[in-house]
Amino acid sequence: MAGKLGNHITNTMDTVHFLLLFSSAVFAFFFFFFFLRSTAVKNNNPPPPPGPRRLPIIGHLHLLTPLLHHTFHRLSEKYGPLVQLHLGSVPCVVASTPELAKEFLRTNELVFSSRKHSTAIDIITYDSSFAFSPYGPYWKYVKKLCTYELLGARNLSHFQPIRVSELNRFLKAVTEKAEAEEVFNVTEEVAKLTSNVISNMMVGIRCEEEEEEAMAVIREVTRIFGEFDVSDVVWFCKKFDFQGIRRRSEDIRRRYDALLERIISGREEKRIHGDTAADFLDMLLDIVGKTDVNFTRDHLKALILDFFTAGTDTTAIATEWAISELINNPKVMAKAQEEIDDVIGTGRLLQETDGPDLPYLQAVIKETFRLHPPIPMLTRKSTADCAIGGYRIPAKTLLFVNIWSIGRNPKYWENPTEFNPERFLRSGIDVKGQDFELLPFGTGRRGCPGMILAMNELVSIIGTMVQCFHWSSGDVAVDMTERPGLTAPRANNLFCRAAPRMNLSPLIN
């Protein structure tokens, strides 16, 4: 009896062991099955780009500094050329190489064809800005209008006398200060020149006639557009105005609207009596309410603001950086002057059409763009999920292409911090958006439609400043510190002394 009981217990234990082993085998089978399956799924879904650890709610806001492109440059040096960040609740990626710029902006151009709005942009531009509008019928219409009509070759030729006249006024003012051996504010004089050119082309007036009110508004607009608004990125802060950006934006819009309404109403009164000016304002008034897309009075005002901000501040900034670099690099200045003397001489002023015959001057402009792009980062927003460089980029991700960082990358530029225009004489790199090492005007559909006008202006303004004057900042080098904002101007106004190189009286009167 005891033996039978022992055998029964032994058989029961064997059964239990078998069941345990069988259960373990089944568990192991399913465990490895689901593990391998999940691994396969994970392998088919690319990982996100690398980046620093983020904090709850604020994400990486604590890492940011006022000079955002500098911050992103340092992060790319630590984490690689493609960095993922979260600005509050907004996911973003920062690209810092030409290869990534090409993959984002050309290969995946349609995915990244939108731009992110902000509270300031929506308020100041009547929520109707062409520059920030989504890729759609309105954007396509205005892009075509700008490219083939407003900024087409025929119109640029039509307005050339205005640009020549304003440049002569500028040269005359500088000559008077040079003859008096006066140290003067070059920043202010160049800003007046570019503002008067665009103002005259756009609405037929000079900024001085409006007590420089337009210049002040433009500077405030570019500054506030570049400010980081916590209310735009932290979801529970949307209804608050911690930084006063909403209040300041409404004030800027009120002043800009009053200024422009005064100008538009005056023009409409003249048009009633058959007096037209054939400037941009006349062209735009002709199409208000008469196009296949919705083009209202607010759209007209927003488009004029787009032109003012894009055509005055950026050109003035590039000119000021170029002259600052030339003052700090006298050998480069002398070589540029020698080229102009050989090609143009002293019997006439350099003109826009002389650009192709002045390769060294063109190289000076390109080198200025490389080190000091007026807009240091291109921003886009993804409209769909995609994979870039082996990483997953979700829809609604904000993209920053740090062209300031690309221009200082030693992998692509020898001695990148040196101002050396000769590097462009040895390469075929251009500014037209096909060479992703240098993108001052962007690229593709979102590229700047005013590139030809900007390059013509820079050739004539920088060229005549170099041709007509010696420039000096005294015994100290020009400070090259930047100021924060949508654009990247010098932190402090440029004060220096000019000395005439030639007799300008018979040439500018």
Image (cartoon, grey):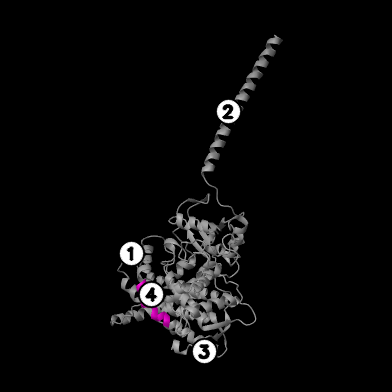
| Residue assigned mark 1 | 293
Q: Earlier in the sequence, mark 4 or mark 3?
A: 4
Q: What crowding class fits label 1: few (fewer than 14 Cα within 10 Å), some (14-19), or many (20 or more)?
A: some
The span from disc 1 to disc 2 (Cα, nearest Å) is 65 Å
Q: Main secondary structure of the magenta part?
A: helix
Q: Earlier in the sequence, mark 2 or mark 4?
A: 2
| Residue assigned mark 2 | 26
Q: Earlier in the sequence, mark 3 or mark 1?
A: 3
Which image quarter is the N terminus in? top right
In the rendered image, residue 328, in percent from the top left (x then y), is placed at 60, 76
| Residue assigned mark 3 | 176
Give SS at disc 2: helix
Mark closer to the observer (3, 2): 3
Q: Is residue 271 visible?
A: yes
For the record, the magenta segment spans: 153-164
Q: What crowding class fits label 2: few (fewer than 14 Cα within 10 Å), some (14-19), or many (20 or more)?
A: few
The residue lying toward the viewer, choosing from 360 and 442, is 360
Left or right: 417 with respect to 383? right
Give SS at disc 1: loop
The span from disc 4 to disc 3 (Cα, nearest Å) is 30 Å
Mark closer to the observer (2, 4): 4
Give SS at disc 4: helix
Q: Are marks 3 and 1 in contact (CB under 8 Å)?
A: no
Q: What crowding class fits label 3: few (fewer than 14 Cα within 10 Å), some (14-19), or many (20 or more)?
A: few
Q: Earlier in the sequence, mark 3 or mark 2?
A: 2
- Residue closest to the far front: 342
